[in-house]
Image (cartoon, rainbow, N blue to C red):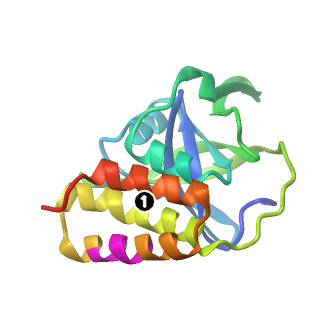
């Protein structure tokens, strides 16, 4: 796979006009996702057997898709093989996958991914920005925190918020404000 690199690749997954930030585990040539059971993304993948990994450098979009829905115009339909898949219209690049559930528990599903198509829409070079990376990390922690209110997760969110305030630009700061709005006041 050209766009995915070893380790966990943070992308925004699209399924049937649904978007959510997800990590794709890519190791030894094998790509998988672990999804919370009961989510729209998990249900759509089980039903349709496909997912699109969108690579995009927009911190606000990571937060928005973690906690809310996007309007229909945020999506574009793409023919892939004998079916039509949905991707983000503004994606810098995207990878269409066939998706097969390998394991299912009450809490999660493990999905094996087989690449069908990979497209780079826009070539851009992004320097490492700790603020952007911390928005992604804070968002991951926040999705779990909203479920279990673990104080250790809140500490991690606050830690990453400090990095965003120190290292982030306007978009990262806007994403942080949005994230804090979704979390609301601390319990």
Relative vertical location of residue 18 with respect to residue 6 in this rendering, above or below: above
For label 1, the residue is 139
Q: How would you rate the neighbour count of disc 1 (Cα within 10 Å): few for under 14, some for 14-19, many for 20 or more?
A: many
Segment colored magenta: 155-160
Q: Position of residue 155 (x, y in %)?
A: 28, 77
Q: Residue at x 41, y 42 (%)?
A: 42
Q: Residue at x 77, y 59 (%)?
A: 3
* Residue 53 visible at all: yes
Residue nearest the observer in this picture, 44 or 67:
67
Relative vertical location of residue 157 with respect to residue 41 in this rendering, above or below: below
Q: In the picture, which quadrant includes the N terminus? A: bottom right
Left or right position of 183 against 166: left
Q: Based on the picture, tell me whether residue 50 belongs to the magenta stretch.
A: no
Q: Based on the picture, tell me whether residue 159 belongs to the magenta stretch.
A: yes
Q: Which image quadrant for residue 8?
A: bottom right
Relative vertical location of residue 8 with respect to residue 39 in this rendering, above or below: below
Q: Which image quadrant for residue 82?
A: top right
Q: Residue at x 38, y 78 (%)?
A: 159
Q: Could you tell me what secondary structure mostly forms the magenta stretch?
A: helix
Residue nearest the observer in this picture, 37 or 146:
146
Q: Position of residue 56 (x, y in %)?
A: 68, 50
Q: Position of residue 52 (x, y in %)?
A: 63, 41
Under circle 1, the secondary element is: helix
Left or right position of 137 against 29: left
Q: Which image quadrant for residue 96?
A: top right
Relative vertical location of residue 90 with respect to residue 58 in this rendering, above or below: above
* Residue 35 visible at all: no
Residue nearest the observer in this picture, 150 or 42:
150
């Amino acid at each position: 796979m050209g766009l995915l690199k070893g380790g966990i690749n943070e992308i925004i997954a699209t399924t049937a006009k649904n978007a959510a930030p997800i990590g794709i585990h890519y190791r030894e040539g094998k790509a998988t996702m672990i999804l919370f059971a009961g989510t729209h993304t998990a249900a759509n993948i089980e039903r349709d057997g496909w997912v699109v990994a969108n690579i995009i450098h927009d911190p606000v979009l990571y937060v928005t898709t973690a906690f809310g829905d996007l309007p229909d115009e945020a999506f574009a339909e793409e023919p892939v093989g004998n079916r039509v898949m949905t991707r983000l219209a503004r994606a810098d690049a995207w990878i269409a996958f066939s998706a097969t559930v390998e394991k299912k528990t009450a809490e999660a599903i493990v999905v094996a991914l087989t690449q069908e198509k990979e497209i780079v829409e826009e070539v851009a070079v992004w320097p490492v920005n700790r603020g952007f990376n911390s928005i992604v990390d804070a968002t991951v922690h926040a999705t779990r925190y909203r479920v279990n209110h673990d104080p250790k997760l809140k500490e991690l969110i606050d830690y990453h918020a400090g990095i965003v305030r120190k290292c982030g630009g306007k978009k990262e700061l806007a994403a942080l404000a949005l994230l804090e709005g979704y979390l609301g006041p601390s319990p």
